[in-house]
Amino acid sequence: MDYIRLSKEISYALRHAPWEYELEMDEDGFVPISGLLAALNESGRYKREIVKADLERIMEISDKRRHEIVGERIRALYGHSIPIHIRKTESVPPETLYHGTAKRFLPAIREKGLLPMNRQYVHLSCDCETALQVGKRRDFAPVILTINAVQAFENGVKFYIGNEKVWLCDNLPPVFIRF
Ligand code: HQG
């Protein structure tokens, strides 16, 4: 079983296109596992039947905690772009967070701050190493921005928990970013 391919398809379904899989998503982003499995299996894209244990295996071997299973439901923990807003748990962030990005985006970020762009939230990393990996998706030598997260929080920017390493927030004005 190609678990990377399966994980990518699940992220696509749960972050960007639940309707393509006939999935009804609740406001926390959960869908029934049975529905997801039915759609994946009906697609004929996989050589054998996908079962719940395969989803659990993906989470076990994944480099990042992208998905969460609770009982008979599954959700993506971050990354959503669907028009229906996914509710996340608001929380007080750590003093400092990081954001890895491409050099070419810096002029716009300096001017407008960090924006969610195509997603529902801005994504921030707990440590520089994670931010570097995120940035490398877009630039071979990315820049790591340091975010004064508590200061932003105290000035009204809302922060939410993604997973242990990923924090989410709403628009982050440039005044809270160290370039
Ligand atoms: C940039 C992956 C211009 C921003 C990752 C980023 C992450 C601006 C890009 C998660 C801007 C959006 C999310 C502005 C922000 N002007 N560009 N004002 N504000 N940007 O993919 O944070 O592996 O939506 O810097 O690891 O790169 O898929 O966000 O470069 O955790 O699980 O616009 O997705 O996780 O790109 O990545 P993205 P991201 P997975």
Image (spheres, helix red, strand yellow):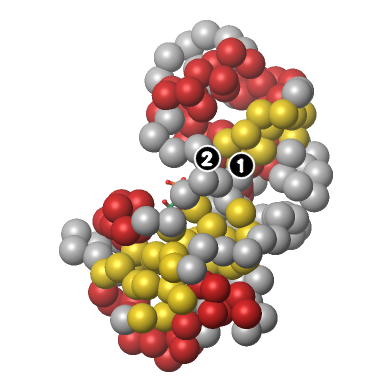
Q: Is residue 6 above or below residue 86?
A: above
Crowd rating for badge 1 (residues with CA inside 10 Å; few <14, some 14–19, many 20+): many
The residue where tag 2 is placed is 66
Q: Quadrant location of residue 93?
A: bottom right
Quarter of the image where the N terminus is located: top left
The residue where tag 1 is placed is 76
Quarter of the image where the C terminus is located: bottom left
Task: Identify which residue, 144 or 92, lies in the foreground.
Answer: 92
Q: Is residue 144 above or below residue 29?
A: below
Task: Identify which residue, 9 or 58, lies in the foreground.
Answer: 58
Q: Residue at x 74, y 39 (%)?
A: 30
Mark 2 lies within 8 Å of ligand 1 (Cβ measured): yes
Q: Residue at x 46, y 76 (%)?
A: 148
**Which element carries disc 1, helix, strand or loop?**
strand
Residue 75 image offset from top left, x and y in percent: 66, 38
Residue 55 image offset from top left, x and y in percent: 57, 22
Q: Quadrant location of residue 96?
A: bottom left
Task: Tell me the quadrant of ligand 1.
Answer: bottom left
